[in-house]
Amino acid sequence: MRFLREATREPSQIERAKERSIFYTIIADLIITALQLLVAALTGSLTMLSESIRCILMDTVEIYSYWMLRGVHRGRMHHFQFGIGKIEQFAWMIFGTSLFLSGLWLTAHVFQSVFEYQPAPSPVGLAFAAFVNAINFLINILSFYAILSASDQKESDIFRAQRRSRGLKTLTSAILQVTLTIAAISSDPVVAKVMDGIGALLVAAIMVVTGGAMMARALPDLLDAPLSGTSFERIMAAIAATAGATMDISAIRTRRSGRFPQVEITLSHIHTGSVAELQERIRELRRAIADLDEQIELSVVIADEKK
């Protein structure tokens, strides 16, 4: 089966604006990542090494998200009858694991360079690194503004993730600008090395936290874990408040697909009477769940109780 089908619709002007805002930021990110790799290789800056590795992994996430967003906007994934939540979470699991392990490796590399007393990067090299990071900071600000300008209340999960990622990038580059500038203007090589190491450890910590959060979000969905106790209790309370309460319910199963909870209710037709009464009972359950949360995807199954 083909992963992407032929386009079934044309994207709207708002959707095209969202795609353009992400596309131009990806191009800018790829250029600045190449510069960061070059600076890391020439100067030996640990901060630039950490940031370039993080950017490579996050650029991969952005390219994948952009590809998914274009597919959604053109109706190429409607053949997935249960949505694309599993596809998204599987990708987040891979990217999150990569970020987490890379962050741990960078942390070990920073401490190794400190204990082995490797020489600090030259002031000229650190100044060049600070200059490249300043360009990256400016790109992040402009990109974040472009994505915010294209935002609306009906934006998808993919676009919302892009906005959060860009905000984090902007904050990170701002902090790194401070550490790199101090390292570049310092006349003491020890101070320069310490500030460069602090910047690298900061990036590594962000990678570990971000990667861990991505894995923690993806794993329950991949394993079809039930909704949390609080969410399940709210659903049960909404069902119990209906006229039929829970007397005719033989089973309830829950899981999450992305940010959309999924609930499956199995009804026993023995307690519901005629077909008309059964249909009214199903409508009653759908109203109760929709009043609780319109994002919940409800499925109602009629139990086959024949022996």
Image (tube, rainbow, N blue to C red):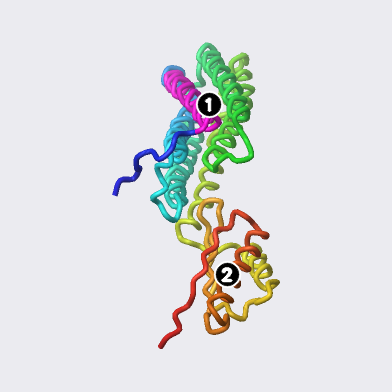
Mark 1 and mark 2 in contact (Cβ < 8 Å)? no
**Residue 196 position in % (x across, y down):** 56, 25
Q: Is residue 30 magenta?
A: yes
**Residue 168 position in % (x across, y down):** 60, 34
Disc 2 marks a residue whose amino acid type is Ile
Distance CA(mark 2)–CA(mark 1): 43 Å
- The structure residue drawn at horizontal position 45% and vertical position 47%, both measured from the top left corner, is 88
Q: Residue furthest front?
A: 276
- The structure residue drawn at horizontal position 51% and vertical position 62%, both measured from the top left corner, is 225
Q: Residue furthest top?
A: 124
**Residue 165 position in % (x across, y down):** 56, 35
Q: Which residue, given by chain and number where applicable, does mark 2 sit on?
A: 282
Q: Which residue, given by chain and number where applicable, does mark 1 sit on?
A: 21
Disc 1 marks a residue whose amino acid type is Ser
- Determine if residue 155 is in view: yes
What are the residue bounds of the magenta stretch? Answer: 12-39
Mark identifier at residue 79: none
Q: Residue furthest left?
A: 1
Main SS category, magenta section: helix
